[in-house]
Image (cartoon, rainbow, N blue to C red):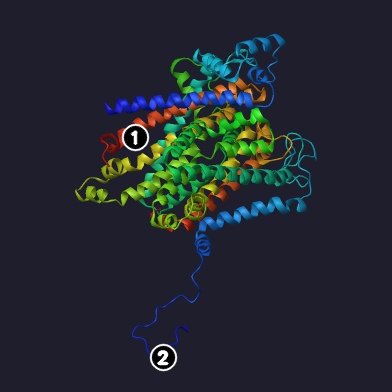
Amino acid sequence: MAFAIHLVRQIANAVALLLAVLVLNFCLIHLAPGDPVQVIAGEMGGASADVVAALRAKYGLDHSLAEQLFTYLGNIAHGDFGYSYYFNEPVLGLIAQRLPATLYLTLCALVMSVIIGTLLGITSARRPNGIFSHTVTVFSLAGYAAPIFWTGLLLLLLFGSVWPILPVVGMTDVVHPKQGFSYIVDVARHLVLPALTLALVFIAQYSRLARVNMIEALSADYIRTARAKGLPEWLVIGKHALRNTLIPIVTVVGLQFGNLFAGAVLVETVFSWPGMGRLVFDSILRRDYPTLMAVLFFSAMMVMAANIVTDIVYRLIDPRIRTGRP
Amino acid sequence: MTTLQTSTPLAIEPLDLPARPAASPARAALRQFLRSPSGVIGLCLLIVLVLGTAVGPILYPVDPLDLVGGPFTPPSADAWLGTDYLGRDVLAGLIYGGRATLTVGAVAALITIAIGLTVGALSGFFGGAVDAILVKLTEFFQILPPLLFAMVLVTLFGQKLTTITLAIGAVSWTSAARLTRAEFMRLRNLDFVKAARTAGAGNAHLILRVLLPNALPPVIVSATLAIGVAILFEGGLSFLGLGDPNVMSWGLMLGQNRNYVLDAWWAVTFPGAAIFLAVLAISLVGDGINDAANPRLRRRT
């Protein structure tokens, strides 16, 4: 029950913050140099005089700022995030088409990075001064410093021309469309490189985090107790030490979901993955502001959702939070 | 060791005081830093990169925006690292581009830290309503993915190097603010702060002269890392087509040549490697400073 109340409060907080993002978007439209109509229509959208007049009326641009804000929020409450004059389509539809592919890529990379990162960290913590541990340390330094778009281009170069065993473009084989099971295999093959590129950065960070926390956990008294009572080593590590190693990782996953999402946008433009990345790229090129602002809003929404999920996962891992005991 | 001259023999041997006067905290920290291998390697790498962009033009006097040859000329004696899609010299681009990229990184990091310190210090020092408002503000900025937010700012306010720098600074201050806030809250109730307050120190004096110096070590580490993050952001923005087309930078080279990666690997590989090395150097230096600033933490890792 206490949890239900907590969850409701969390969601209310999320809604308030998202409302604030909309207000921010509204302020940006008005702060940007030039006529707000231009911003709403998109600079190179080729908005005709009629369109401009229609937009003026629709967004109430001749009224006071407060009224304009209410009109803006009202439109969004009806699912109207504006119209992309470049794509000739409502912005909401554009986002709805692209979001699934991006989520698919993001979640795959997330799962990959958490599992591989934790495993690398745990294994290297077993012998903190061994060769494997040093290799992981060097790898995580390099993985952190390598710009994600550059790693992507290098992998594209490697698998695109030197060693063509994996597809480097798109999500499916356009020339030989597949059906049924081989369709799934096809998508999975296309997913490998983008997901790996995106995951590398986060594997680097999580392995470092897992290593530090595992080393600390292994020196704790409860681990000595667990070993003393004769628990097999894999249970000591896999159950007792792992919990305390996972907590900081869950925190960081929650904090970094926004970066993961932004990383996905960059990676998608490298591998022509048909998600939000290409949309963002084209919108920037055409100065399609409504689309860009909607992307910002929906990414904030994803981050909020991720935060709420993180909070729930926390409670599953850490009984102290569940029971409220220190 | 010549020490005290006393007429009566001492019952106890004089303490074996260090011959040198006690090292100042800064010097002690420097010594610690130089003992950290990652810090030293990073610093050397960073010096090489900065020197390269500083004296490079003397040794390799080629204008990075000039068309020196045909497009996609592979590395040769004329253009050591080849030419890009327009026929501009890649090595000259690296030298001049490094100036812009490193400057953007440093200035954006300064802005990040300035905002983060201000928000965090006010929030942690005053607590109460001020804290509640500033924490909400931080929370708000945290749900906006920094790169995407910077992207919106740069598209709206123009693709100029100053706008890019300001945008990067404006979107990435939240972790510095949280860090500063936590430090201030921890320090606020310690005895030396209470003593200063009892002695009549005003809020401004307490924040700037008493708390700030003690809160700085972890903030310096995060400031160092912020330079690396800003450099990655400059690259990311340019990669999305939001670089300043009039100023050569590492990010711009990558962004403009990305579509020709299969025709001219050198035009994207080298600028990317430059960003990689710069960020690597900076995070190594950050590790070194961390070791020097928090000797306590070092034992744990």
User: Residue B14 at what x, y percent from top left?
Assistant: 39, 81
Q: Chain of mark 1?
A: A
**Viewer-proximal residue, B19 or B72?**
B19
Q: Tag 2, which chain?
A: B
* Residue that lies at the very extreme toward the left in this rendered image: A229
Q: Residue at x 64, y 31 (%)?
A: B154
Residue visible at 51% across and 17% down in the picture: A96
Q: Position of residue A124 (x, y in %)?
A: 39, 48
Is A267 rendered above or below residue A91? below
Q: In this view of the protein, which residue sits in the foreground, B210 or B225?
A: B210
Q: In which quadrant of the rendered view does residue A248 lie?
A: top left
User: Disc count in the image?
Assistant: 2
Q: Crowding near pointer 2: few (<14 within 10 Å), some, many (20+)?
A: few
- In the image, taking residue A323 as reference, residue A189 lies left or right, namely right
Judged from the image, the secondary structure of the residue bearing numbered disc 2 is loop
What is the quadrant of residue A243 in the picture? top left
Residue A163 visible in the displayed image: no
Callouts 1 and 2 on one subunit: no
Kindly report the distance in space between the C-alpha atoms of the residues bearing marks 1 and 2: 70 Å
Q: Tell me if residue B116 comes above or below residue B300 in the rendering.
A: above
Q: Amino acid at mark 2?
A: Ser
Toward the viewer: B151 or B121?
B121
Mark 1 — residue?
A314
User: Camera-side residue: A275 or B196?
Assistant: B196
Residue type, numbered disc 1: Tyr
Residue A117 drawn at (x, y percent) = 42, 40
Please name the residue that numbered disc 2 is placed on: B7
Mark 1 nearby-residue class (10 Å; few <14, some 14–19, many ≥20):
some
